[in-house]
Amino acid sequence: MKTDFKVEQIVKLISYLTGLTGFVSVSRHVSYSYSLLFLSLLILSLVFEKKNIFFFPRWLLNAIASAFILMTVLNTTYANLIEKVIEMLLFLLAVKFLEDKKSRDHLQIYAIAVFLLLGSALLSVDLLFLAYFLTLIFLCSLAVIFLAYLSEEPSLRMEREVCAKVVSKALLIPVFAIPLTMVFFILLPRPFSPLLKVPVPGQKGVTGFSEGVKLGEVSEIQEDDSTVFRVNMREVPSSLLYWRGIVFDYFDGRGWSMSNKSVLEKMGRHPVSGEEIEQTVFLEPYNHKYLFALDIPISVNNTRTSRVFTSPLPRGIQKRIRYEAVSVFSERIAAGGINEDIYLQLYDGISSAITDLAKRITAGRSGRAKIDSILEYFAKEKFRYSMEGLPVSSSPLEDFLFRLRYGNCEYFASSTAVMLRAAGIPARVVGGFKGAEYNEMGAYYLVQQRNAHLWVEAYVKGEGWVRVDPTPSTRELFIEEGRRDIFFRMKQAFDVANYFWNGFVIDYDLRRQFSIFLRIGEGIKKPAFNLDLSIEKEKAGHYFIVFMLIVLLAAGFVMLLTRRMPQEMKIIGKFHKKMKRYGYERMPNEGLEEFVSRIGDEDLRSRAEAFAADFGMLYYKDQKFTRVHARRLSEKIKEIKPGKAKLS
Amino acid sequence: MRPSKAVTDTRLEKFNEIFESLLQHLHGKEKALRLALISFFSQGHLLIEDLPGLGKTTLAVSIANALGLKFGRIQCTNDLLPSDITGLSIYNKTTEMFEFHPGPIFNNIVLVDEINRATSKTQSALLEAMQERQITAEGITYKLESPFFVIATQNPTEHHGTYPLPKSQLDRFMMQINIGYPDKESEKRIIMEVMQSEARNLTAPVIRKEDVVDIQKSIKDEIYISDKILAYILDIVKSTRNSRYLITGLSTRGALAITETARTNAFFSGRDFLIPEDVKEMAEFTIPHRVVFKDEYEGSDKREILRSIIKEVPVPV
């Protein structure tokens, strides 16, 4: 029943797996045509492998590879450098597989696969990278072991058990590498974002946040699933989930922007009051400079937000950052007086149709009632939400209001703000996100580009700024669409892993580590029972990391120790323990048979003898203790019982 | 290659047959008989040290008979000459040539009675023959019989006119054993049997010479010795060399003797591999005559001292 494999076949299998891992790690970054080319060449080489005929001579393959490299080099620019190099490596890898492989070819395959992984790291570093990395380490160390066998004896065959043993040993290499990696982890500075990713200027036609709103340029908007930020906080009713980012006050007929006048406004800060809520936000690099927080944010990292309750940074965010924000749940911002010039601005060439409409539907009303009348108008006239067939024109608002009667939040918010202004109510547009997915496993909200939203703030005398969201609630359906598939929970679980990876691995810098060590130092100096149970959140995070490190190290040591103890020693230890319970202790100079022969109880002795004979047979014949043996022997130990119930 | 279990079993059966049939005639000598057979099948020589009249000769003769082997006997006295053992060339008048007349050593089993009564010269001639398994007389080398097994006896308390064997020569004996007094029941049966039949008909052959050789060979080839056991043996050897009871420890030949006898012991126990118990059991009979005890321990029970030395050595598992 013994199956054995040719070592050469094993090495080939590992090489193919390594190559595939390398390919998969970069597959996100190469075009479909390259992926297809690579995979089809791989299949071709598998066919060669099967028939053991390598159709192409080596010189031809080398010539093709050289020609390809030359071609690629000619096409390479600074911007696409990494992609081109990856494509080149992929092609070389495929060519390597086409050859009749010798030891060095296998080694070259491993090297290329590692380079591919490195290339992928230059483009993006995320949790998947770790998975590929560990897989490659494992495969490569395994391959080197088998290659060593192969170079000794090319026709070597290996039994299944032996293979399994080698594989399990090789599996330990990444495990042992982890403590070493930790040293580097502590010492090396961490890249926060892909090392070489050239920022792509804001893509149009994709849902998402931007620092300016432009209407009438694209007819169709696609949902974008990429994550913008995650917010660690308690779950709140979804109607409260307005994430404020930017405030626009100037409309030129087609787009919104900041006039900067509101910032220069000589007014004092408007007070807000209500229930305060703290948030820890992990913001992905998204190229813009605004920080987000629940409406209405009053402070970010203990710094008060701007007069319009936004927190812009000096420049765009290029790396993942983390900040603490405090917000107040309030639908209005009390304000004594405002600079009405800014918020009543109307653009040149506004069609009279709009102003007439505004005046007509708000006629005879005042304050809040004016706002409600506009919202009622949208409802009554059955304006609907759409992201397709949007007006591409120079007068998008007119098209939206009078011709199409459908659009996305940009159209609803813009037209509402304009109509409010036309009706004499100061208004501004707020950009940010609405809604989010609460991840219960990680206790955080996940906000994606698809959640991007615009809404309006109107100034009602005596009340202050009031939030007005004219976009129909059907928007929610669009957002929700595709979220309830069977993979949803899986995706969520994966996102939790990502969340922790980002929070604890990527964002983990030396300064913070020092602070952890300092904290540990403090903790040691302080009496241990002084530990406050209500540790603040951040501190808890640190303790968590330290705890995990200790657990990992301990686990490593335990593994080291148990690994060092061979199977037979574990079994004999179990036997000794059991016999001790019955009052028989074996002397170190006592042979196993000698020991069991002095057992008084007959039943106990005969069972112990059965174990001793079996164990001795394996041990003193230098036979390998397989799992089957171990199980059988353990079974025999279990059977050792005295004749009558002597222990009771 | 490991033998198929069946082969080993038939050999083991044969051994048990020998043992049982011998035991019928050797009441109360079970232990001595077993050790003698171990020594024989390990292809080593045996030294029995005991008082006269305890059945040393009976044991030797019985074994020879049971195994269907040629038996010779040498009674040592202080005027025994080497040629009395090896044989000598005598001039033949008719052929006008010297003819070699082999001595009693040209047998499969040779009983050397009271070896310490022979002179040193004779002793060394005998022991040389035991070691080399050949005799050289007048320039011609004569091979001894195979299997070749010497059982020598000596009386411990006889001091007058004895030439004690030097350690170097004791080393040539694989084992040294005692027979000891039989228990009351066995002794009674011995006396009864002697009374009933005048001439004690000793055992009839149980197996053939070829079977004996076959068993010897299979013990040599088929019993597995683990490195762990070898390490254990060497640990014991080392501890004899460092022992506070001993002046000199065990020789390498001694270590070899432990290994070989332990191997035979394993075979006789129905195992095709060694366990520490084999080693321990044999160490008592293979070590004491090879090592030199300190003067203060000369008088005490040497086996007991040895046991205490072995006790210090942990077994492999």
Image (tube, rainbow, N blue to C red):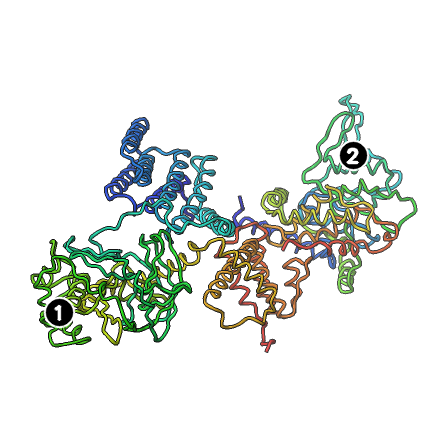
Left or right position of B227 against A201: right
Residue A647 tag number: none
Picture coordinates of residue A48 (x, y %)? 29, 36
Left or right position of B306 against A438: right
Disc 2 residue type (three-letter): Thr
- On the rendered image, what quadrant is the C terminus of chain A found in? bottom right
Number of numbered tags placed on the structure image: 2
Task: Tell me where residue A338 sits by quadrant.
Answer: bottom left
Q: Residue at x 28, y 67 (%)?
A: A242
Disc 1 residue type (three-letter): Phe
Picture coordinates of residue A26 (x, y %)? 32, 45
Left or right position of A529 against A506: right
Residue situated furthest bottom in the rendering: A648
Residue situated furthest top in the rendering: B96
Disc 1 residue crowd, few under 14, some 14–19, many 20+, Cα 10 Å:
some
- Judge whether residue B46 can be spotted in this image: yes
Q: Secondary structure at mark 2?
A: helix
| Pair 2/1: label in front | 1
Picture coordinates of residue B113 (x, y %)? 81, 45
Mark 1 highlights which residue?
A378
Residue situated furthest front in the rendering: A266
Q: Chain of mark 2?
A: B
Mark 2 highlights which residue?
B86
Picture coordinates of residue B131 (x, y %)? 74, 37
User: How many angstroms separate mark 2 from mark 1 (CA)?
Assistant: 133 Å
Q: Nearer the viewer, residue A19 or A157?
A: A19
